[in-house]
Image (tube, rainbow, N blue to C red):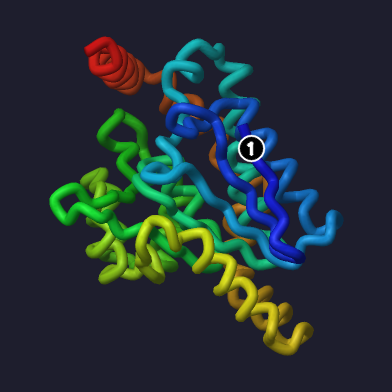
């Protein structure tokens, strides 16, 4: 469900959980452990990638709806821990957004240092990215909103998260949600190029400047005592959210049968 591909000192972590790279407990744990272990395994930069046409479909709702309170709490602690590992990584992380990236997929993408997104070959069917949690009945947690505000600004982030908007790649670029658009087959290669360019900078100056620049993001996501895990779990099990989540899953199952 997770492939490690070494490009010299740049390690690519490729989500490989068919069919849509949905984030279940096992994948989140594997990815968190891989991010945390990377510096000690010789990585000087990370690239996080997905499948062609789809980076990640976000949280695996059918699987998570089967969990009780304790198991969901453990999963969300791991998920926020993964976000913290990306936000506080001592080496740069490039998000290679290989296609659509809703909800949890977008969360992972915005934690990186730089975002390269695929531009669809069909303008009528653009790839989309966004924090659309509201659409499935869940509030967007504050640390996640903070991460988005760093990219697009306070007012624009408010408009996006309160609407649960999924925006196309061109608009994402214009807003600063992503940094660069390239052809689908070039996404990972360009992410690696960016990492190599960063590694050419004077090491101490680049590393220390990066640490200071990302200190606010790390502070928001790296202290387990401050993470809203219990709040998210309570919101998840609220009657309104459960009704909406189950309706979404029913729609997905209906589409799969067609």
Q: The N terminus lies in which quarter of the figure?
A: top right
- Provide residue 93's location: percent of width, then percent of height: 61, 62
The residue positioned 59% from the left and 67% from the top of the image is: 192
81 or 197: which is nearer to us? 197
For residue 48, above or below residue 239? below
Residue 251 placement: quadrant = top left
Residue at disc 1, secondary structure: strand
The residue positioned 20% from the left and 52% from the top of the image is: 122
- Provide residue 52's location: percent of width, then percent of height: 42, 45
Q: Which residue is mark 1?
A: 2
Report whether 126 appears left or right of 115: left
- Provide residue 193's location: percent of width, then percent of height: 57, 73
- Provide residue 50's location: percent of width, then percent of height: 50, 45
Q: The C terminus lies in which quarter of the figure?
A: top left
Residue 249 placement: quadrant = top left
46 or 176: which is nearer to us? 46
250 or 241: which is nearer to us? 250
For residue 40, above or below residue 34? below
Q: How many marks?
A: 1
Specify whether residue 222 is in view.
Answer: yes
Specify whether residue 243 is in view.
Answer: no
For residue 126, above or below residue 182? above
Residue 152 placement: quadrant = bottom left
The residue positioned 66% from the left and 82% from the top of the image is: 209
The residue positioned 26% from the left and 71% from the top of the image is: 174
Report whether 141 appears left or right of 39: left
Local crowd size for mark 1, using a 10 Å CA cut-off: few (<14), some (14–19), many (≥20): some
């Amino acid at each position: 469900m997770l492939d490690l591909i070494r490009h010299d000192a740049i390690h690519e972590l490729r989500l490989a959980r068919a069919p849509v790279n949905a984030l279940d407990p096992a994948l989140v744990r594997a990815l968190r452990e891989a991010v945390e272990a990377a510096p000690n395994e010789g990585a000087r930069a990370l690239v996080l990638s997905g499948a062609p046409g789809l980076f990640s479909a976000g949280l695996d709702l059918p699987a998570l709806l089967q969990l009780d309170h304790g198991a969901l709490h453990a999963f969300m602690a791991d998920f926020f821990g993964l976000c913290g590992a990306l936000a506080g990584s001592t080496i740069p992380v490039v998000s290679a957004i290989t296609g659509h990236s809703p909800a949890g997929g977008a969360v992972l993408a915005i934690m990186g240092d730089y975002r390269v997104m695929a531009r669809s070959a069909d303008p009528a069917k653009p790839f989309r990215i966004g924090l659309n949690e509201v659409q499935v009945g869940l509030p967007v947690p504050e640390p996640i909103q903070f991460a988005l505000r760093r990219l697009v600004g306070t007012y624009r982030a408010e408009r996006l998260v309160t609407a649960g908007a999924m925006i196309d790649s061109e608009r994402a670029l214009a807003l600063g949600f992503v940094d660069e658009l390239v052809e689908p087959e070039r996404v990972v290669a360009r992410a690696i190029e960016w990492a190599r360019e960063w590694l050419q900078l004077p090491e101490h100056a680049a590393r220390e400047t990066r640490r200071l620049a990302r200190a606010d993001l790390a502070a928001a996501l790296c202290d387990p005592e401050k993470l809203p895990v219990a709040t998210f779990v309570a919101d998840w099990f609220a009657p309104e959210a459960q009704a909406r989540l189950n309706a979404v899953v029913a729609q997905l199952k209906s589409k799969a049968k067609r």
